[in-house]
Image (cartoon, rainbow, N blue to C red):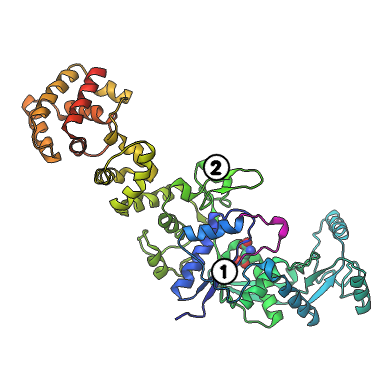
Amino acid sequence: MESNVRVRFAPSPTGPLHIGGVRTALYNYLFAKKHQGTFVLRIEDTDQTRYVANAEKYIIDALNWCNIPFDEGPNKNEKFGPYKQSERKEIYKKYANKLIDTGRAYICFDTSEALDEHRKQHEAAGKTFIYNWHNREKGNLINSLVLTNEEVESRINAGENYVIRFKTPQDRILELKDEIRGEIRINTNTLDDKILFKGDGMPTYHLANIVDDHLMKISHVIRGEEWLPSMPLHVLLYEAFEWETPKFAHLPLLLKPVGKGKLSKRDGDKLGFPVFPLAYENLETREVSRGYKEDGYFADAFVNMLAFLGWNPGTEQELFTLENLIEEFDLKRVSKSGAKFSPEKVSWFQQQYMQTRNDEELTALYLPILKEKGVEKDKEFVKKVVSLIKERAVFVKDFWELSSYFFETPTNYEEKAVKKNWKEGTSELMTELVTIINTIEDFSSENTEKQVKEWISSKEIGFGKVMQPLRLSLVGKLAGPHLFDIIAMIGKKETITRIENATKNL
Ligand code: GLU
């Protein structure tokens, strides 16, 4: 049965979702699923100046790729819809007016030029201008607290531009509780009277966010640390509306690999890792940013890595399926301090997940790449190749580099390795080896290994003298899985051709 736990991910569609945003979505999802609750997606697009056309689709595609779909949101179970704030415009004005009626908000006619002037004058005197209890009723600012009702009405009727501000209560110590950070005390006299409703007929983030969280019955607000400074205002708004306040949890920032400062796209560009889940094309500049998906990461490896950026299970275990994460996730184990992003750890998770993938699945991913290379081999052969190389692979896209010699006769030989291993007498040894190989009937890995090694022993020379040139002949470099597995795979005829090629060319 569904519980009363309802959480939301509320991104603003201003561009691609940064991995910090994906982590916020993930923690919301895990928390919801752990408590049999509901995960809501709400698009916060009240700031039309920052709206980007392809961002909403990007957000939804990213959640789907991560396998953390929302239960309610745009075009899906719209129980408390619409789930896009721009489609809820009519709702907010009513609530702003309600606060005016109860004396918790007021109308301001100050022009932006006048406010700039106040700011400048304050700066000149070494002070900061804050619109709040200090000055709102002193007569320098033009608002409904100092004007008569008639004056306010006639200004509005004359079409004068106005905003609605929250009237922050004075002389109170707020005792806030954050599920991750614990108790926070704030003196309301330090807060400014934030704008709730703008001159363009749109609510600000603060008003829309609170009204929607209330109407959508959100029980827990789990969001990034950058919203912590808004918490006092939000709690005061709930109080002003006489609504029940949800619980709050502010997640730690994602930090640069060096540990200081917020992780940015620039860090990713510099160090060569994506900061977005999916590749993204900026519609204006046409610049394309890399994404984890397109770079070849498995979604579950990416999600596992993200889960650990700010949370840990309290044990040594690091590999968790989504189901395990749901079971183990607990806000109490989310850290207060910033989470350092580590590109090495991302690769580590990816490599671990590569090893857990079965050969069948990896073969299905490799076959189209082989087809592109013009290689036609039967599936069972490819599957065997995959089983031999996957422990060295981080991505499926590495497979070709790691296995091309299973499909193509090498034409280049790694120079350094040749110098070191192809000595005087090597060609003669290799020619003799061909005659030995020719006599082997059972060409299994075990048998060729036995026969070749017996021959080497009988010659009383070191194994390396034969094995290294043999590997160079077959692979072109000193890399790859067990040599006799390769021999068994490519077969007798091809093994001999390759040894003869090398003997001719080196
Ligand atoms: N729209 C805000 C954002 O872009 C939402 C913040 C919140 O979750 O309250 O992150």
Q: As drawn, is 272 to the left or to the right of 144?
A: left
Please tell me whether mark 2 sits on a helix, a strand or a loop.
helix
Q: Amino acid at mark 1?
A: Gly
> Residue at 68% across / 80% down in the picture?
239
Up-down relation of residue 366 to residue 149 (above or below): above
Work out which quarter of the rendered image holds the C terminus and state it: top left
For the point 16% across and 32% down, the residue is 492
- Name the residue nearer the viewer: 102 or 157: 157
Q: Nearer the viewer, residue 128 or 429?
A: 429
Residue 294's x, y, as percent? Answer: 47, 47
How crowded pointer 2 is (Cα within 10 Å; few <14, some 14-19, many 20+) is rated as few
Residue 460 lies left or right of residue 333; in this view the side is left
Q: Judging from the image, what secondary structure is the residue with disc 1 in? A: loop
Report ligand 1 position as a quadrant. bottom right
For the point 87% across and 75% down, which residue is it? 145
Which label's residue is closer to the chain start, 1 or 2?
1
Instruction: Give the Cα distance between marks 1 and 2.
Output: 33 Å
Please identify the quarter of the rendering in which residue 463 is found: top left
Magenta stretch encompasses residue 47? yes
The stretch in magenta equals: 43-54
Position above or below: 381 against 276: above
Disc 2 marks a residue whose amino acid type is: Asp
Give the residue number, with chain letter if any, for mark 1. 73
Residue 269: numbered disc: 2
Please state if 284 lies on the left or on the right of 338 as rendered.
right
